[in-house]
Amino acid sequence: MTPLAGVSLWAWAACVGSALLGVAAANLPPPERQYSILFLLPMSSTSHRNIFMSVADALAERGHKVTMLINHAVESKNENITFVFHGLDDFRPENISMFTIRKDVREATKIYTEKILAVAYPFVFGLPYITVTTVGVDFVHSAIFGNVLNPAYANNFVFHLPRPLSFLHRCLNLFMHIATAWYWKFWSMNKIQGELSAQFPGLPSLLEIERNQSLTLMNSHFSLDTPMPLLPSQVEIGGMHCRPGKPLPQELESWISGAGDAGVVYFSLGSTNQGVAIPRHYRDILLQAFRRIDQRVLWKNVEGVDDVPENVLLRKWIPQQDVLAHPNVKVFISHSGLLSTQEAAYHATPVLALPIAADQPRNADQIRDTGFGLVLEWEEITVDLVLEALRELIDNPRYRRSAAEVSRAMRDQLMSPKDRAVFWTEYVIRHRGAPRLRCPAADLSWVEFLMLDVLAALLLGVCVCLVLLKRFVRSVWRAVGRRSKDKEE
């Protein structure tokens, strides 16, 4: 996928309005003024939209007027949020098969390289501008802010390499860092830039707009990912959408509680991966495995499935966080999407990860490395492997302990992700783009940043010194030789 895949953008129009009375979010003081805020979310998956909705709801609760350009119907009871639907079909679940993308990565990159650049960048230049990175820390996006992450330890988006990185892995990681950055800047952007410049000759370049970012809110947290050195303009809000569990509908509560000590396995491949999209071969393997376990299985699936065992309950919609919070849910079988991974960690539920595409393999590796789950590859799964993994996760208490440790670390924060998102958003607006947050490295070229010109000058100086030294030594040697010859004569 492209370097900014999963990075959706919004522009902030900070229009001064009337003062708000008695409106505050959590422990933050009331905002000084009411602001009008525009969210640009023209192409997004349902899960990406949910991250933005968490931010939008938090700001709307503060009294700010939020307008969202969006491609998914969404419900919000907050009267401060206005939705503008554009009707484009991109990223709709019925039009996407992650298993198809798994086979052909070009399908995943096409929508970003051909469409998203033209519609997701704010063309109202000069206003405070904030981005949300829905996939967490991205090394290309980080470099735009002047924070170039070291490929010796910062994995690229596509591959999650084992740590510590071997020599070959560091070579591969360096190549991926350079190749993806080059592809994004010199291929994807140039391809769109020509069309935009022809239509809007007075518009700043996409690169200039991109560098105009004041802040990025990143859907990450160090408890679930590799700790990275971050700038003040890079704020982690990972798990912002997570919340304590609520009581389940009575029918579902009775079914889960009725499983007894054996408990329940919850199975969901996310909002994008509909059950009918699972290749039949894999679906049959899972059904055979479910038929042989003692647990009940709750499966989120929008379509009917043939030959469903009696211990399996299918539902088109499931309150996932409320289910994960239930004490009788033993394991979460997940595609390891980032939001689902964060929810499983927050509610301390062990995970059997079946990653499909995009950032999911990376998330699955983090689940395994953190110790609260196991990972199976789709091409390798068998009934016995699924059964073995489920029994290990259910019977071995160390996975539940590891999940509880991750949950405690994730929840142990001085300020909630919601408060951080609200504070820094209002900060950027109050300070008219907050130029003091801008790192000087953002204005440097690669030559300047890596000090290649300085190193070249030093190398040239060393070479000059060596040449002079060589000439000096040669002159001295010749002088000594002449004196010796004169004495002999």
Image: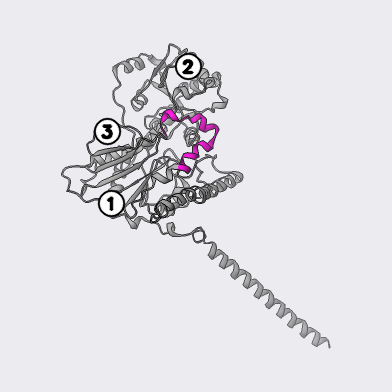
| Label 2 to label 3: alpha-carbon separation | 37 Å
How many discs appear?
3
Determine the residue located farthest toward the left in the rendered image: 21
Does the CB distance between marks 2 and 3 fall below 8 Å?
Answer: no
Question: Magenta includes 475?
Answer: no
Q: Nearer the viewer, mark 2 or mark 3?
A: 3
* Marks 1 and 2, the one that precedes in the sequence: 2
Residue underneath mark 3: 76
Question: Is 376 above or below relative to 38?
Answer: above
Question: Is 146 above or below relative to 249?
Answer: below
| Label 1 to label 2: alpha-carbon separation | 52 Å
What's the magenta region?
91-114
Q: Nearer the viewer, mark 1 or mark 2?
A: 1
**Amino acid type, callout 2:** Phe
Q: Nearer the viewer, residue 183 or 264?
A: 183
How crowded is the residue under tag 2: few (<14 C-alpha within 10 Å), some, or many (20+)? many
Q: Is residue 402 left or right of residue 75?
A: right
Secondary structure, mark 1, is: helix
Q: Residue at x 33, y 35 (%)?
A: 241
**Amino acid type, callout 1:** Ile
Question: Where residue 408 is drawn, which disc sits there?
Answer: none
Q: Residue 373: percent from the left, percent from the top?
A: 47, 29
Q: Residue 370: percent from the left, percent from the top?
A: 47, 35
Q: Is residue 467 left or right of residue 250?
A: right
* Marks 2 and 3, the one that precedes in the sequence: 3
Residue underneath mark 2: 290
Secondary structure, mark 2, is: helix
Residue underneath mark 1: 429
* Marks 1 and 3, the one that precedes in the sequence: 3
Task: Determine which quarter of the picture holds residue 20.
Answer: top left
